Amino acid sequence: SSFHFDWEHDWSYTLGSDKFGHFFFPYLTSDVYRRAFLWSGVDSTSSLWLASGLALTYETYVEVKDGFSKEWGFSWGDFTADALGAAYPVIQHYVPALKPYSMKISFSPSEKFRAGEHTAIFDDYESTYHWLSVDVHALLPEPQRSVWPPWLHLALGHSVKQLDFAGGGTHELFISLDWNLRGVPIEGWWWDAIAYVFQYYRLPAPAVRLYPNVVWYGIKF
């Protein structure tokens, strides 16, 4: 179709939960690109800026492509989330106070996914959980850091349920423990690789759903 904007369904069809994904993907890929630039010999500051720009460039391409799609349209909400996700690693670099706060994702099959409504779990917002992981150890004053292990974070989570893609559905909010594998005192390149991957994925841990009602989970995936 001709290029157009999506104003009608941008915030209604998933209750805005897709914006977390639009933040997360460039946030993740900008770090992957940064490490690739570092490996190729680019200095650390240039690597950071180049990686952020590359992540945003790709996401901008996707949004412009959607602008020519009859089904979708260019979404300012998506683009804003994309830009913030690509910029967040740069902001963390220049504002060290934000370094204890990172983004993670996890998946737990929803009833709709189990019923076969989605072929890939990545396409099911009800199976997707986004988490703000907080490094409590780093936030504590130096004398008190010994009381909180560096491998244990707290995480605030969000998901949605009962979506009808027309504005209906329910938000879910969680608080959970979160494992920081990079804080575990194990050395070796193999452990570094595992810990690097899982700094972006929230592993199963005890959690409490705070909204829409309180539910305790011994283990929440």
Image: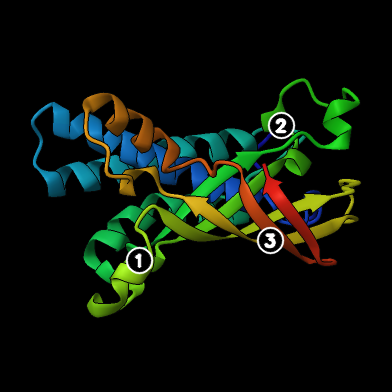
Location of the N terminus by quadrant is top right
Q: CA distance from mark 2 to mark 1?
A: 35 Å
Numbered mark located on residue 137 in the image: 1
Q: Nearer the viewer, mark 2 or mark 3?
A: 3
Residue 66 is marked as: none
Q: Which residue is mark 2?
A: 123
Q: Is the residue marked by circle 1 packed among few (<14), some (14-19), or many (20+) residues within 10 Å?
A: many
- Residue name at image x 15 percent, y 34 percent: 38
Q: Is residue 6 above or below residue 149?
A: above
Which type of secondary structure does the marked residue at label 2 adopt? helix
Image mark count: 3
* Alpha carbon separation for disc pair 2 and 3: 21 Å
CB contact under 8 Å: marks 1 and 3? no
User: Mark 3 or mark 2, which is nearer the start of the sequence?
Assistant: 2
Residue 156 appears at what percent x and percent y?
A: 59, 62
Q: Residues within 10 Å of mark 2 (few under 14, many from 20)?
A: few
The vertical placement of 23 against 61, above or below, is below
